[in-house]
Image: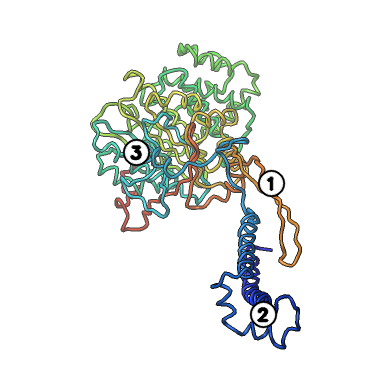
Amino acid sequence: MTVKNRIIVFILMLIIMLIILPVLSSIFTEFLEVYSFNLPLVPENFIINKVKDIQTYFDFFSKTYPANILGWGVVGIFIIFFIFGTARLKIQNKYTQMEEYGSHGTARFQTPREIKNNYFKDKMGWFLGSNLPDLKYSVGMSGAYHHIESSLNMQTLVFGSPGSFKTTSVVLPNIFNIPYMYKYQEEKADLIITDPKSEIYSITAKYLKDNNYDVHVLDFINLMYGDSLNPIEYISSDKELMEIAEGYISSIADSSNITFSSDSFWEQSEGQLLGALIGFIKKVYPASQQTFREVLGILTSENVRNPKKAVNFFNKYKIKGSPLQLWKNFLLSEDKVRANILIGLATKLKLFSISGIENITSSTTVDIKKFGAKKERPIALFILMPDKDRTFSPIINSVVTAILNQLYKTANDYGNILYSPTFLILEEMANIGKIPDIEVMLGTMRSRRIYPMLIWQSLPQMKNRYKDCWEDILSMCDTHLYLGINDDFTAQYCSRFLGNTTIKIQGTSKNTGSFLESTRQSESLNYNMRNLMLPDECKRLCQGRLILNQRSFYPSLLYKVQYRYWEKKVRICDLSNVKDLPEIKSA
């Protein structure tokens, strides 16, 4: 019987008792006083008259006859029995979390007070969200921030399926916050942003310009507007040469619009040949001609295609070092194999035959040596890339790789730490391709004041791009944000990463019977282990919430805070248009 039904039965039984007991008490008292123990016949309608007589009930509660006292005791025992019985019969409809007991795990979410203490100190760091629902983002608002001087690094991974508000609740708020948090400081921070669809540039460019930023754009969507950057211009070592070459070739493997063999032998061979040819033009050609377009021209020339001329090609120009060794490795292959390598690399370099790509990569108008360096004004660079395909991923990969390498060289000029902190907000990391040695760089970025935010749609995306080191990348980033999960792999990882907790569960059994449906129940309490959130619960995370998981802290459930740029009343700045930028000069 449910508690509600038991209360109804109790009330009915109590009413019956309060009707019957006064009558019985009155009869018993009168019997003792009048009839002694002579047991005569009870007069007709005697009991009925007693029930109808209101004085019977007044006497029961006002006079201390022995029979009345006995009746009061019966009522009292009945009430006490009900109260204690109902309390004991209360059955748990949900387990109780007992992480403080800790026999099977101590995982739990941070309390509101802990969230306040840990993330509401000031605005110096990544903006994460809020402890209150349904807020609209505004610059400098109170919220949860991962402090830049925290004991944890600033390397942040963001996972969010399409429609989980990655752009409006993470990317845009942080672009607005970075200039704000350095507003009253002598140093300023530089920004590098990958921008699918050019939406981010449109929404934030004017704000950055109003905050004295030099704003630059590499336009891999229209191939017409903004700035240009030649990655080869910034190669200054054999290591960087190979990173640019390998990054380009591996990123081609992720491009869905180009069909080729993905066999590692061919990729490595093509990467070595590309490295050799880049090294060749770096040593032989003038700076204005050190471009990928020239590499493609050499690749299809007679000096490379003709085996007899190829043997003496590098010696003729007195090429030495790594480029010569890479060229010799290419020559070791049989003629047929060499022909396949040449065809494969020519296919991968055909992007540079597109006039727009040639224009963007043949000269440099945005000097990446200024990122992190001492200068008059901070810089923001938007790398626009199409979100519908990955055709230009290899070139974008070369650009990002060149920028990262240059940041380390700039840091070396200032005692291994950048003069100006540099924030990288890399939206749609899958469209950039595999950045060479990213897991190694993540181990040293903090000391250089390079602060990356790597944004993915899912963990399988990252695992697919970084097959051999995705777990290293996860371990190098102290902050993980889960905005929305659609796939099982990410859900399982998130659930496991949140940890196990201890729960208390109730076992019950009961025997029912008798006039009052008296229930005897035995109760047993057991402690079991449970994931703080099961994988299916991670996938059902409320659209307005996010999971924050950081090393050495309990996880937190925060509310997303969107920048609602479509509402003019809360818009921070006017929108910009890429097509208002000057056109790129033809190469």
Q: Residue 472, position in %: x, y?
A: 54, 28
Residue at the spot of label 3:
121
**Residue 374 visible in image:** yes
Whether residue 359 is visible, yes or no, is no
Q: Position of residue 56 (x, y in %)?
A: 59, 79
Residue picked out by circle 1: 524
Q: Give the quadrant of residue 292.
A: top left
Q: Residues at badges 2 and 1 in contact (C-beta under 8 Å)?
A: no
Considering only order in the chain, which callout, 2 or 3, is on the residue closer to the N terminus? Answer: 2
Q: Residue at x 72, y 64 (%)?
A: 517
Coloration mode: rainbow
Task: Estimate the x, y position of residue 120 in percent, counting from the top left.
Answer: 36, 41
State the residue at coordinates (50%, 37%): 554
Secondary-structure class at tag 1: strand
Label 2's element? helix
Question: Callout 3: few (<14), some (14-19), or many (20+) C-alpha neighbours within 10 Å?
Answer: some
Q: In which quadrant of the rendered image does the C terminus lie?
A: top left
What's the amino acid at mark 2? Val
Left/right placement of residue 276 relative to residue 587 reads right
Residue 511 lies left or right of residue 316; in this view the side is right
Secondary structure under the numbered disc 3 in the rendered image: loop
Q: Determine whether, in the image, residue 56 is placed left or right of residue 584.
A: right
Nearest to the observer: residue 7 or residue 432: 7
Q: Which residue is mark 2?
A: 34
Q: Is 354 on the left or on the right of 253, as rendered? A: left
